[in-house]
Amino acid sequence: MTDRLIIFDTTLRDGEQSPGATMTRDEKLRIARALERMRVDVIEAGFPNASPGDFEAVRTIATTVRDSRVCGLARATDADIDRVGEALAGIDNGRIHTFIATSPIHMREKLRMEPDEVVARAVAAVKRARQHTDDVEFSPEDAGRSEQDFLCRVLEAVIDAGATTVNIPDTVGYSVPAQFGGLIGELIARIPNADKAVFSVHCHNDLGLAVSNSLAAVQHGARQVECTINGLGERAGNAALEEIVMAVRTRGDVFDLEVSLDTTQIVPCSRLVSGITGFPVQPNKAIVGANAFAHESGIHQDGVLKSRETYEIMRAEDVGWSANRLVMGKHSGRNAFRTRLAELGVEFASEEELNEAFARFKELADKKHEIYDEDLQALVTETNLAASNEHYRLVAMRVCSETGETPSARVTLQVDGTEQRATAEGGGPVDASFRAVEAIVESGAKLLLYSVNAITSGTDAQGEVTVRLQREGRIVNGQGADTDIVIASVKAYLNALNNLSHESTRRHPQGGDV
Ligand code: KIV
Ligand code: ZN
């Protein structure tokens, strides 16, 4: 009989821990719905004790998502565990994921705890979590650098205490495939009650080995893989969901495992996550990069035309690369607009919100005749942004760019309800516009990243701009979309400034205090 591989997505938790990838509750809900539509088995929705906003996000996802399990993360403390219990209260598809570090360096330097204390804490945490739900996962953080004998001891104890999944994280991405696969095999063989829990892995990509390590672990008996869309995550990220799933599907001869995912949702989901977080997908990224199925060389093109299998091992349409779907034009009505967005997983909270988005759609349709799903996604992101954090709002702008002349920009902003205007020159129209904004706002923020992507093809495509700013150690992203990329740039810059102006008092789950 073929075994199943459980796909555990942590885009909304570990993915959100990437600097600048912070998401609002509504954005998280949109991604959670897309993951559910893709039939992901488990969605790690967040770390509820990070802040009241994080709690609300997990609670909202838990009470909305029905077809996937919804998981919340907790350090091994009563306060964290009870907070997850509260966020998942009343649902029957909830999971509590609790963890404590087990490597010598983490126990000594971060926790300042003796190994015996760590075992006791782990067991107590699992027992506490079992008071809230029967579905409890335990992770020995930094397992990749932990001693094998100690891991066996901790894992046996937590399985005895009621953990139904034990997850082995390579927290710092230190492992290499043969060794990590071997570790999983050894743990399963040596732990006497290993058959009472599902073995899971969670690999970081610091050496670019997250996917390889995860797959090696699967070959040695792991039956859950933790991963993220586009490989988002702390530092170099986590194992990419799309790569794990397609490797297991495409190489059924090697893995012989069932994965219940609807893979046609992979590309739409990747775009949604990239649009919301502002983390672009590199063109040569496997499965979801723009070039993943493009054949440049003449020899390859010729081969593919004669027989696709000569150079393609997967079908583009199986991972959701349908040709851009023309969904609507300027004559499309409100109902068609609402229906298509519902198909994309977007529902409006009120008639006003729908009207606002529809007005933007009509404006866009006047500038761009063919509107694709990607345009609609960007439009909804824009509408949500406009509704959420409007400390600074763009009222009008004018840009002059001429050969032989210094570009200049005049920008009018509404700052807390009052209009202010400034003019500035710069190296190019975007630089001049940002300088004009700064002349008004005086944020003192450092620009870390500026990137522009065309959302669809054609010169009338909307440009989607990401701006990353840093001030006093805090990093935020901002996004903006428009058929005019200078306007999109200013929208993105203002969005980042608005995000920066919001206070943040979130706890980081792996920050060190237990
Ligand atoms: O990388 C890690 O160790 C984690 C744990 C919280 C599972 O993200
Ligand atoms: Zn992690």
Image: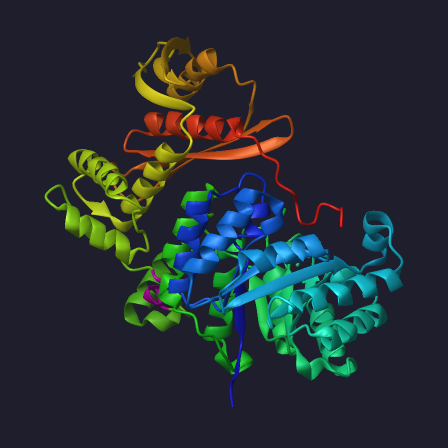
Seen from the viewer's position, the closer of residues 303 and 60 is 60
Q: Position of residue 137 (x, y in %)?
A: 64, 67
Q: Position of residue 462 (x, y in %)?
A: 29, 37
Decide if residue 108 is on the left or right side of residue 330: right
Q: Position of residue 183 (x, y in %)?
A: 74, 72
Q: Position of residue 375 (x, y in %)?
A: 28, 44
**How many numbered callouts?**
0
Verify whether residue 336 appears in magenta: no
The region drawn magenta spans 315-320
Magenta part, dominant SS: helix
Give the image quarter of residue 305. bottom left
Residue at figure coordinates x 43%, y 26% from the top left:
494
View extreme (left): residue: 331
Q: Would residue 363 be visible to someone looking at this image?
A: yes
Give the image quarter of residue 507. top right
Residue at figure coordinates x 47%, y 15% from the top left:
441
Residue at figure coordinates x 79%, y 69% from the top left:
154
Residue at figure coordinates x 28%, y 44% from the top left:
350
Above or below residue 315? Residue 322 is above
Q: Quadrant of ligand 1?
A: bottom right
Give the image quarter of residue 422. top left
